[in-house]
């Protein structure tokens, strides 16, 4: 059975997922060990509260440092994001993902001008990569 604590009454080594993230650690494969309940909502039905009535608590002693991605993983993530952010028609890479429904940027779709601060211009093709 998972223990329950009221806000302000739980031990210091039990923290929420957001507090774990702020400390740059992860649960380390372990699940929550307790529940943090709101004092106002303890005796009320959950639907009557305007804020979340509970939060899962994780043991800080069991937490492990976050894994650091390798350069190959970062490169693969960048290629995946580039595929979602690059317009296939004009080749500009936007800072946000393009709409799947349109399949291209707004300027290519219906001629709506796009602010130049929202994208990176396509690089000119390289004829060769020799130094001399």
Image (cartoon, grey):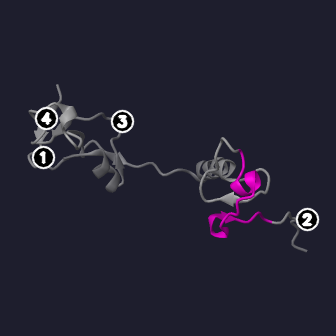
Which residue is the site of mark 3?
29
Q: CA distance from mark 3 to mark 4?
A: 21 Å
Residue nearest the observer in this picture, 68 or 87 = 87
On screen, residue 42 versus residue 51, left or right, reads left
Spatial separation of the CA atoms under disc 2 and disc 3: 50 Å
Looking at the image, tell me whether mark 2 or mark 3 is earlier in sequence order.
3
- Judge the density around disc 1: few (<14), some (14-19), many (≥20) Cα neighbours within 10 Å: some
**Residue depicted at 35% across the width and 50% down the height:** 25
Give the mark nearest the N terminus, 1 or 2. Answer: 1
Where's residue 69, x and y in %?
Answer: 52, 50
Q: Nearer the viewer, residue 29 or 121?
A: 121
In the rendered view, tell whether residue 76 sits above or below residue 95. Answer: above
Q: Of helix, strand and loop, which one carries label 3?
A: loop
Secondary element at tag 4: strand
Neighbourhood count class around disc 4 (C-alpha, 10 Å): few under 14, some 14–19, many 20 upward: some
State left or right for residue 108 relative to residue 33: right
Circle 1 — which element? loop
The residue singled out by tag 2 in the image is 127
Instruction: Mark 4 and mark 1 in contact? Answer it, CB < 8 Å.
Output: no
Does residue 111 show up magenta in the picture?
Answer: yes
| Residue that numbered label 1 is attached to | 7
Q: Nearer the viewer, mark 2 or mark 3?
A: 2
Nearer to me, 91 or 1: 91
Return the mark for residue 4.
4
């Amino acid at each position: 059975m998972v223990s329950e604590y009221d806000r302000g009454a739980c031990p210091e080594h039990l923290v929420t997922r957001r507090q774990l993230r702020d400390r740059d650690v992860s649960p380390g494969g372990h699940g929550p060990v307790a529940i943090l309940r709101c004092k106002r909502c303890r005796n009320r039905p959950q639907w009557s509260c305007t804020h979340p009535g509970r939060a899962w608590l994780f043991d800080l002693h069991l937490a492990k440092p976050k894994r650091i991605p390798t350069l190959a993983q970062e490169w693969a993530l960048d290629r995946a994001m580039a595929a979602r952010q690059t317009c296939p028609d004009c080749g500009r890479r936007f800072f946000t993902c393009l709409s799947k429904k349109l399949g291209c940027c707004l300027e290519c779709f219906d001629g709506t001008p796009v602010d130049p601060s929202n994208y990176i211009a396509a690089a000119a093709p390289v004829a060769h990569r020799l130094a001399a």
